Amino acid sequence: MLILFFLFISMVDGFHQPSVATANGKNGSVSELSIEEKTYPLSQLQDDFRQFRKIIEKRHPKLYVDPQELSDLFTAQYQLLRDQMTELEFYRVLSPLVASLRCGHTNLTVSKAYEDYLRKNGKFFPALVRIINNRAYILQDLSGQGIPQGAEILMINGKKTEEIISSLLPNLTADGDNTSKKYYLMNNWFNGLYHYYIDNATRFSLVYRTEDGQIITKTLDGITNQQMQMTTMSIYYPRGNNLLTGSFAEDHALLSIKSFSLRNKEQYRAFIDHFFQELADQKISHLILDLRDNWGGSPYYASYLLSYLISTPVQYFDDQAPFYYNKYKKPLKPASQRFTGQLYILINGASFSTTGHLCSLLKAHGIGVFIGEESGGSYLCTDAAIKVTLRHTKLRLHCSTTPFATAVADLPPGRGIIPDYRVTPALHDYLAGVDPQMHQAIQLINLQ
């Protein structure tokens, strides 16, 4: 009986072996697996999946998704679960579900432990990349192997460029049918997105074509670079001393606002007041408002700026906005030193959330000329997100719960603000450090 008892104990221990995050070293010693190598039993993955699905189904507004299509996709993705998946493999199962909500404010992020691991140990594709007309180009070689600027990427680790892009798109979040936000993310965080959604290899077989038509293959070692793996939520809240800048030329002024997620209301008001007072004092009649790369923030900051750009009272939010924004449902009065000249507004795929709200009000009231690329946001979005960490894998879900819409009419849902002058940087603009959108604004000013 004693022998049978010990046999039983050994069998029980064996049943639990796969879920233990350790491995035998060369000398038989036990070493802890990295977070990248750690795997999870099917039961835990299924539990996290059900937790994730329950939150989405109960809390998300689902403005742009067909409920049956979403249900079918949940069923399909659930079938992909298998025993002993890594966190990243599980993340790739859930990510298309998040993107299918077509909500730019709902995002899924890897665990804090995995994020910290990548910050210290992550090996990313060693070049800065730009996507132009669904083709990828080397903007800067970081491998030290002399890949020329402007070389076109044909293939990475056996995947063609078009296959990589088409795999990234259904994993990236945006409002409705908007794609400008997705391409902005690809252009600025290609390396991290490639790791998350395509291939977490540490070496890369690159096939590229030079400007003179040569096709070359090189094997590159991945590099550690903290800026390459920034999470979606971290890019929404930029920090720094150059978020608000103003400058004055002889015939125009430039106001650049890179975030409405600010911390000091008094400092902001003082900056805006002083800038527009200077505009009035210098009698400048042309203003370039640069809202590119501004992911949004509080309506307080956007509405205060709006008061300097309107000539008659304007309602900010529509009557369906949450009660805690009641003050924005009342007419906003023009500022005493409001700008009365010609306004030129620069936008791109990262002009999102509150910035999209501001742009929608300017567009609807015929204020200013829009230049650049379709904005990432417009009059309608969902936010007031809840943050949930999945029980076992610790993936972090940022799930929107509430719609917000500005008091406008006749703007298309699920699209950004379409610029009056669509200007997309070309490869030679990137390589030469030229800003064609700013150049277009100055050209229009010179024509006046």
Image (tube, helix red, strand yellow):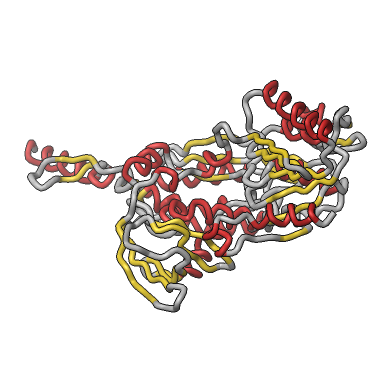
Q: Residue furthest bottom?
A: 213
Q: Nearer the viewer, residue 230 or 216?
A: 216
- Residue 415 visible in image: no
- Give me the residue at 43% from left, 73% from top: 209
Q: Nearer the viewer, residue 99 or 142?
A: 142
The quadrant where residue 180 appears:
bottom right
Specify whether 346 is left or right of 183.
right
Q: Is residue 30 above or below residue 268?
A: below
Q: Is residue 187 above or below residue 251?
A: below
- Give me the residue at 56% from left, 43% from top: 54
Residue 347 spot, x, y in % from top left: 69, 50
Specify whether 427 is left or right of 259.
left
Q: Residue furthest right?
A: 312
Residue 439 spot, x, y in % from top left: 69, 55
Specify whether 202 is left or right of 257.
left
Tally of numbered discs: 0
Q: Is residue 354 above or below residue 141?
A: above
Q: Nearer the viewer, residue 145 or 362?
A: 145
Residue 44 spot, x, y in % from top left: 39, 44
- Residue 252 visible in image: yes
Q: Residue furthest top?
A: 266
- Give me the residue at 15% from left, 40% from top: 30
The quadrant where residue 444 appears:
bottom right
| Picture quarter with the C terminus | bottom right
| Picture quarter with the N terminus | top left
- Give me the residue at 84% from left, 46% from top: 342
Q: Nearer the viewer, residue 387 or 309?
A: 309
Residue 441 spot, x, y in % from top left: 74, 53
